[in-house]
Amino acid sequence: MSVDGAVPPNFGFEDSRRLPGPNRYFGSPAVTLTALGPAATDPQVQATWAERVRAMAAQLGWPDPEPLVVRRAGAVLLVLRAPADGLLTATEVNEWAWERAAAALGSYAFDLAQDHGEAATAVFITRAAAERRPALTALREAAARHDVALVEDDDAVSLGMGKGSRQWPREQLPVSAAVPWGELHDVPCALVTGSNGKTTTARLIAAVAAAAGLVPGLCCTEGVFVGAHAICRGDYAGPDGARRVLRHPEVEAAILETARGGILRRGLALQRADVAVVTNISADHLGEYGVEDAHDLAVTKLVVAHAVRARGTLVLNADDPILMAAVGALAAAVTARHALFAHSFDHPALATARLRGGATCGLRGADIWLSEGGVEERLGTIAAMPLCFGGAARYNIANISAAALVVTALRLPRARLVEVLHRFGSDPRDNPGRLERWNFRGAEVLIDYAHNPDGLAALLGVARSLRPHRLALLLGQAGNRDDTAIRELAATAARFSPDRIVLKELPLMLRGRALGEVPRLLEQSLRAAGVPAERIGFEADELTAANLLLDGALPGDVIVLPVHTNLVREPLRARLELVR
């Protein structure tokens, strides 16, 4: 807001405070402001805006904020670096600079007599001083000297990780001399991100850590888990879930699923991971928080690369051209070693990586192979790995390969990795909500989280590999996808020619849409793709819709249930358990 609190007529911006900016700012504190309207597209306004930000930062004694203008359709973002204890002040500086730049060039009728540079500077100096936390800055510097993580939120600050951590209220921080540094330490830590496969990959890593005798702490879209115990349920694939894991006194290895939403809204909870993996990039959630296309999404996911320690490991999917293109821009900013996986162990990028001593993993013939330091090792045949569905679940071959490289980077025992790969997924409870396979009255039932076109295509590919007599599908979508994405989901379903589709409403996930709007759009798109009307049904409740498909099950059917919430999965499992 402006220093005097006034807002000019037709003035427009979206406050995106605390968001990371484009890739050159990932890994350091930054704030973003999105300007809307005609003034935002004026190059002179943009230049003046950036100049004012830089000049005010100098008055505040801050390092060069390196303001960056990012042009988007109908809007412009200005991103700037800021001190970690000055983000709120930096956001207000950004807003003030935008207002004054637009007004000075006549874009808005605004009283520039109020724009007294010295007065504005005095206001921001006062605000920056109030926001400054010298005790936290000193503790942050001391943590770096002692080589332990510092994790903070609005209420608390902790040092170390898991079993080696200790926590203090944010307003009662100790001086460095009073911290028991000898008792503090980090634990092995992995960040897992990507569009699809995050939860399965993270669960595999946690399972190997447990098999190796460690107590794993896992946060994911299903909750926070320490060892075999659920600490809390819900979507915790963001900073809050990460902090709960990193501060739990029993955790000996931290596996942190790191979703796009958390990165864009709040950044990362820590900057000291041993390894990070990006599973893949799928065009999902576009149009939110300045992410306009798949490249932007790849850059967003790659924020995890900046949290990897020097000489740590960044695990990448060499089969994903969008991801690999975006990685090129990281070279100057990231010191992590790259480890590559691909469907084929003989992928050219993997072969090149092995010549340079890099770790790789992939499929050769019917076996998954891992290489490290020039030594190649067979992990086993996919026919003996339950997650692979005999090779039909190609995406799980990728998830296994990614997890194997993370486990290798964490120096967990290879024998435990092989053991887990040969049993994980044999019981639906190993990987709840992800390719659960049940037998129900002679029909095969697949429960999964597939929530975008790529995920749904992979799931339906597995279903078709089972050679169903009839294929039945539950279909729905959250309301925060645009019309194009919803139509693409329906078109993907239609490609696999289901014999029956039941559309579901998700009343808790409308996210700005009216009741019935998403199912109607799905039905229109299915009909346009050639699905006969008599094959399409609708239920206003997700659980009722799923049960309707189970009620009609016949031997030889395959029923595909992409279920969005655990509240629905649990009663479905209870019903399926009764007739196993």
Image (spheres, helix red, strand yellow):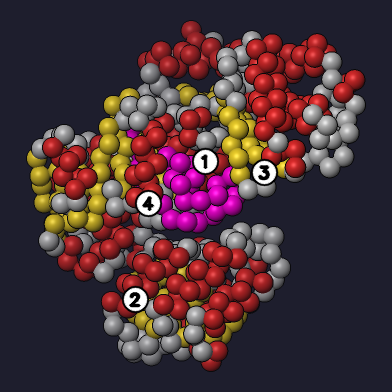
Q: Amino acid at mark 3?
A: Ala
Label 2 vs label 4, nearer the camera? 4
Does the magenta portion include 376? no
Above or below, 538 against 174 in this view is below
- The type of residue carrying mark 1 is Ile
Query: Quarter of the image containing the N terminus?
Result: top right
Earlier residue among tags 2 and 3: 3
Provide the residue designation for mark 3: 75
Horizontal arrangement in the rendering, residue 299 relative to residue 175 (left or right): left
The magenta region covers 274-302
Identity of the residue furthest to the top in this view:
177
How far apart marks 1 and 2 lie (CA) works out to 33 Å
Q: CA distance from mark 1 to mark 3?
A: 21 Å
Mark 2 highlights which residue?
463
Q: Secondary structure under badge 1?
A: helix
Identify which amino acid the numbered label 4 is placed on.
Asn
Residue drawn where x is 36% and y is 37% of the image: 328
Instruction: Please tell me how crowded label 4 is: few (under 14), some (14-19), or many (20+) other residues with Cα within 10 Å.
Output: many
Tell me the distance, in whole angstroms, between the alpha carbons under discs 1 and 4: 16 Å
Q: CA distance from mark 2 to mark 4?
A: 22 Å
Residue 263's tag is 1
Residue behind mark 4: 280
**Between marks 2 and 3, how big is the CA–CA gap?**
43 Å
Q: Please state the horizontal and vertical placement of residue 299, each as a whole percent of the image.
A: 45, 41
Ranked by sequence position, the earlier of labels 1 and 2 is: 1
Q: Residue at x 27, y 32 (%)?
A: 337
Q: Residue at x 28, y 48 (%)?
A: 318
From the viewer's perspective, tell me whether residue 128 is left or right of residue 278: right
Q: Earlier in the sequence, mark 1 or mark 4?
A: 1
Mark identifier at residue 517: none
